[in-house]
Amino acid sequence: MTVSADVWQPVGSLADLEVGDRKEVSLSNGKLILILRSESGYYACCADCPHQDTPLAEGSLDGDILTCPLHFWQWNVRTGEKVGIAELPLEMFELREDNGEWFVRV
Ligand code: FES
């Protein structure tokens, strides 16, 4: 796979992430994203809740369902689709691995 530097931003190795873990990554363009490892894989989304900008890193991840800690909106991290009472989708970013390094498309 060829990784283009002007589209794909490096986020480093994710080897230390276990299922249920998440970490915030500040990209070189200033954007803050959240990377999650669920039971089904690795996903990248906006770091702040689309409702009132609460840091989603403080939320819970159960299976593929991410829950915001403030008003408990939920999303499926595989798709960004809202679940239950959520009124807005979650912005997701494409994530790829190349020789042990990961990149997010923003
Ligand atoms: S701030 Fe996240 S659901 Fe309200």
Image (tube, helix red, strand yellow):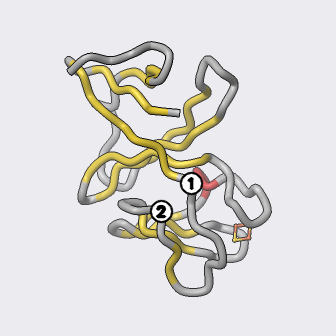
Q: Position of residue 87 (x, y in %)?
A: 66, 78
Q: Is residue 71 above or below residue 36?
A: below
The CA distance from mark 1 to mark 2 is: 6 Å
Mark 1 lies on a secondary structure that is: loop
Q: Position of residue 15 (x, y in %)?
A: 28, 30
CB at disc 1 and ligand 1 closer than 8 Å: no
Q: What residue lies at 47% left-to-right and 23% top-to-bottom?
A: 7
Q: Which residue is label 1 attached to? A: 91
Name the kind of residue labelled 2 in the image.
Gly
Farthest residue toward the right?
Answer: 52
Q: Which residue is depicted at the point 48% across and 70% down?
A: 81
**Kind of residue sitting beneath label 1:** Glu
Asked if residue 53 lies left or right of residue 75, the reply is right
Residue located at (33% from left, 68% from top): 63
Position of 87 relative to 93 (above/below): below
Report helix, strand or loop for mark 2: loop
Q: Which residue is mark 2?
A: 80
Check whether the beta carbons of the residues at disc 1 and disc 2 lie within 8 A of each other. yes
Residue 32 shown left or right of residue 62 in the figure: right
Residue displayed at 58% across by 50% down:
57
Task: Tell me the quadrant of ligand 1.
Answer: bottom right
